[in-house]
Amino acid sequence: MAPADPPSPDPSPLWLILVLGLIAGLSVPYDLGRQDVVNINEVQRLLPALEMRERADWVVPTIDGDPYLAKPPLIHWIVGAAYWVSRSDSPLAGRGAVAVICLLVAWGVLAIGWREAGPRVGLWSAIILLSAYFFRQRAQEVEIDPVLTAAVFGLVVWQWRAVTTT
């Protein structure tokens, strides 16, 4: 009877992080500044942040001076912060903020998968997330979906850790 092959060692953490960084860098932010703002939903995420900053009122988002309360204000605060940090009112600044949130979710998936099931599970989970069409599409526009995804992901991880550590 032939001896079994020894199990292959897990790849180094640095290698996994570099691979994920390369994949994320190629998949999420590659087209942020090229496309015009043609989607009405994206306009409804960009304009309130501009108006909130112009009015110096970060509580009630408005469009053309009328309160816009159809969506939670977190997306407007994030886009407004991106405008302030970049010192630009361009759609690229708002899209960049949402793209960073998507990348943080992917890194979170990598970290949780890695910690709970090993490096390969973490890496493949993050790669699958980054390769999903809907995830990448939402990372290219200022949409509320990535922000809510990040919030729900954070809440689930927080609750899961609370339940498993007690």
Image (cartoon, rainbow, N blue to C red):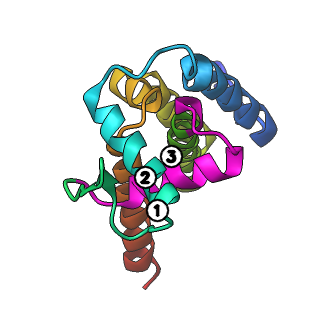
Whether the residues at callouts 3 and 1 have beta carbons within 8 Å, the answer is no
Q: Nearer the viewer, mark 3 or mark 2?
A: 2
Q: Amino acid at mark 1?
A: Arg
Q: Quadrant of residue 10?
A: top right
Q: Quadrant of the N terminus?
A: top right
Dominant secondary structure of the magenta stretch?
Answer: helix
Tag count: 3
Q: Which residues are magenta?
A: 71-93
> Dot 2 surroundings within 10 Å: few (below 14), some, or many (20 or more)?
many
- Residue in the picture at 50% in, 46% down: 105
Task: Indicate whether residue 80 is drawn in magenta.
Answer: yes
Q: Which mark is residue 143?
A: none
In the image, residue 74 above or below residue 22: below
Residue furthest bottom as drawn: 166
Query: For the residue labelled by badge 3, is the local secondary structure a helix, a strand or a loop?
Result: helix
- At mark 2, the secondary structure is helix
- In the picture of the structure, the residue carrying the numbered disc 1 is 55
Q: Residues within 10 Å of mark 1 (few under 14, many from 20)?
A: few
Residue type, label 2 = Glu
Q: Quadrant of the C terminus?
A: bottom left
Q: What residue did someone put label 3 on?
A: 105
Closer to us: 78 or 67: 67
Instruction: Identify the residue under disc 2.
Output: 51
Element assignment for label 1: helix
Q: In the rendered view, would you say 126 is above or below 29?
A: below
Residue 53 seen anywhere in this rendered image of the structure = yes
Percent position of residue 160, x then y: 38, 69
Residue 106's x, y, as percent? 53, 40
Tell me residue 164's x, y (percent). Answer: 41, 74
Q: CA distance from mark 3 to mark 2?
A: 28 Å
